[in-house]
Amino acid sequence: MPFLDKQTALKIGTSSLVLIDAEDISYSVKTDKAGRNIYRNTISKIQPDRVVRRYIELSFKFPLVGRGDKLATHLEILKACECNVSFDSGKTTITPTTGSSTTVQFELYRAGKKFVGKAGKGSVKIEIKSGSLPYLSFSFTALLADIQDAELPAESPEEFSTPLVNENVKILVGESAYPVTCESFELDFGLDIKPRAAITAPGGIAGIVVQERVVQGKFNPDAEKRATFDVWGVYLGNGTDPIVVDASSPTMGVIEPGSRYKITLPKVTYTNISDAVQDGIVVDEIQFEATGVDDEFTIELW
């Protein structure tokens, strides 16, 4: 019997594995090759290449939402994305850090098999778009520890609060906290993840390392005159602006603890501005980079 695409599950965690309701799960097993270039008067290679340095890349997404009673697993794994993550009095707070020793381990169940990853590091992107839920899109690189035949996990996935829909989200820009009208907002943690090659390590990989962080993003506010919203003045003057994305006051549905969120960027520089047409309205397509030293952003969920 063929395996259905829906027969996929993910268990992940920093210290213990928890089944989570991840979406858009995909993976790619990566390898390098080593061998000799021997031909002996033939176009055929006499000795085949050997597969070396195996690792796995995993991507998935999860709503930007927490829990009211404890730190949710899908937020705890942000510690493996060079973040400090804390939970206190019903609020989860996420800030950037450097040199985090936390890694993830996971078991990906797919097509009757279990792919085991360990010592993983990753990056994440926050996507907020009208007509959708807010999402965290994760991408992890990990050592490929094993591949086994396995059935899907029998336990129930971890529960979390019902996520908000993207409505009545306030985007406040500049020192005056000017409220812009936007169709979407994106924040990319911008972590450069690489396997660390080492002849002294089993499999030729000593671990997964984070080499750089460039926090960047984009949003598309309605075009305004400079006297009203002077994004061009900041751009031309190589200045910075604060940006706040505030979803603390939704107006529809039941609001559960852990579903409200607020993203604060104290200083961003605008790297590119162009205009486009969205629903017949001229908008500014703005790209930015957040500046700072381990304080580029603060994310709160409560």
Image (tube, grey):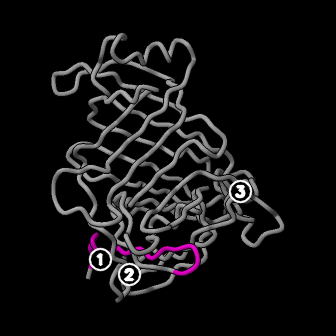
- Location of the C terminus by quadrant is bottom left
Q: Main secondary structure of the magenta part?
A: loop
- Location of the N terminus by quadrant is bottom left
**Which percent across, then down, holds residue 14?**
57, 73
Q: Which mark is residue 3?
A: 1
Q: Magenta stretch? A: 2-16
Numbered-mark total: 3
The answer to whether the residue labelled 2 contacts the one labelled 1, judged by CB atoms less than 8 Å apart, is yes
Amino acid type, residue under disc 3 in the picture = Gly
Q: Quadrant of residue 296?
A: top right
Residue 5 covered by magenta stretch: yes
**Front of the two marks 2 and 3:** 3
Specify whether 288 is left or right of 41: left
Q: Which mark is residue 112?
A: 2
Q: Which mark is residue 99?
A: 3
Crowdedness of circle 3 by 10 Å Cα count: few (<14), some, many (20+)?
few
Amino acid type, residue under disc 1 in the picture = Phe
Amino acid type, residue under disc 2 in the picture = Gly
SS class of the residue under badge 2? loop
Specify whether 96 is left or right of 150: right
Q: Which mark is residue 221?
A: none
Residue 232 sits above or below residue 124 on the image: above
Residue 178 sits above or below residue 299 on the image: above
* 251 or 59: nearer the viewer: 251
Crowdedness of circle 2 by 10 Å Cα count: few (<14), some, many (20+)?
some
